Amino acid sequence: MQLDLRTPTDKEFEEIRSLVKVFELDDRDLQKEQFTIAIHNHELLGFGRLREYTDCFELCSLGVVMPHRMQGIGKAIVTKLIQNSPKNIYLVCIIPEFFAPFGFQQVKEYPAIIQNKMNYCTSELVVPETYVAMLLSKRN
Ligand SMILES: CC(C)(COP(=O)(O)OP(=O)(O)OC[C@H]1O[C@@H](n2cnc3c(N)ncnc32)[C@H](O)[C@@H]1OP(=O)(O)O)[C@@H](O)C(=O)NCCC(=O)NCCS
């Protein structure tokens, strides 16, 4: 599938805001410039976000619209976000098997901001699965 991977327009960003709520993803401090979206035939099929902190980057708020899941769109967005990050990337998730093929490894020690994310997930985004932190080391 031919995908256009780029930053959203204002209108697309409003659509992302709604989808982030529907998918119950991290909706804190959403900013348009943080997002990479996947567009096909003018349709928004997925999105993901890279948040920059002083000591690391975080990959979060990743989602693909239901009818288009399992078609490689999530992977394409993650690949682009990794390319866009100049530094190590952390994430907190319940699906480590999805992220492992990119080189993300589970870690027990992480920056305070990622601990903060872990606390947010376990208190605000409650699910039966266990949240884990992962790190992709890039040569900085
Ligand atoms: C997780 C998500 C982004 C994956 O996007 P996708 O476009 O369906 O995934 P892709 O088609 O690019 O990747 C398919 C691969 O990922 C794996 N995969 C897809 N969804 C998965 C899931 N929920 N858990 C574990 N592995 C998953 C598939 O098994 C497949 O593996 P393979 O390539 O070895 O066959 C999508 O299911 C989604 O939006 N889920 C709801 C929101 C969410 O959970 N976001 C992640 C928050 S950390």
Image: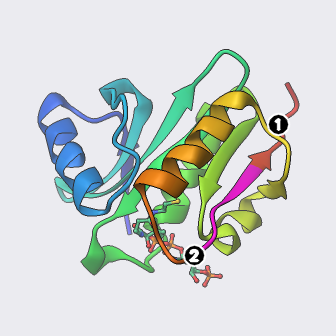
Disc number for residue 7: none
Image quarter (top left, top right, bottom left or bottom right) of the N terminus: bottom left
Q: Position of residue 39 (x, y in %)?
A: 28, 53
In the image, residue 132 lies in the stretch drawn in magenta:
yes
Q: Residue at x 73, y 59 (%)?
A: 102
Q: Earlier in the sequence, mark 1 or mark 2?
A: 2
Most foreground residue, 75 or 106? 106
Magenta stretch: residue 69 in it?
no
Residue type, label 1: Lys
* Front position in the image: 76 or 64: 64
Q: Nearer the viewer, residue 118 or 123?
A: 123
Span of residues in magenta = 129-134
Q: Picture coordinates of residue 97 (x, y %)?
A: 69, 74
Within-10-Å neighbours for mark 2: few <14, some 14–19, many 20+: few
SS class of the residue under badge 1?
Answer: loop
Kindly indicate whether the residue at mark 2 contacts the one at mark 1 (C-beta within 8 angstroms). Answer: no
Residue drawn 45% across and 80% down? 70
- Looking at the image, residue 134 sits to the left or right of residue 83; the answer is right
Residue 113, placed above or below residue 71: above
Q: For label 1, count other residues whose C-alpha is less than 10 Å away and answer few (under 14), some (14-19) or many (20+).
A: few
Report which residue position mark 2 lands on: 129
What amino acid is labelled 2 in the image?
A: Glu
Quadrant of residue 32 within the rendered picture = top left
Q: Determine the residue positioned at 66% across, 15% down.
A: 54
**Residue closest to the eye, 65 or 6:** 65
Residue 114 screen position, x and y as percent: 66, 38
Q: Is residue 126 left or right of residue 90?
A: left
Report how many numbered discs are placed on residues in the image: 2
Report the residue marked by disc 1.
138
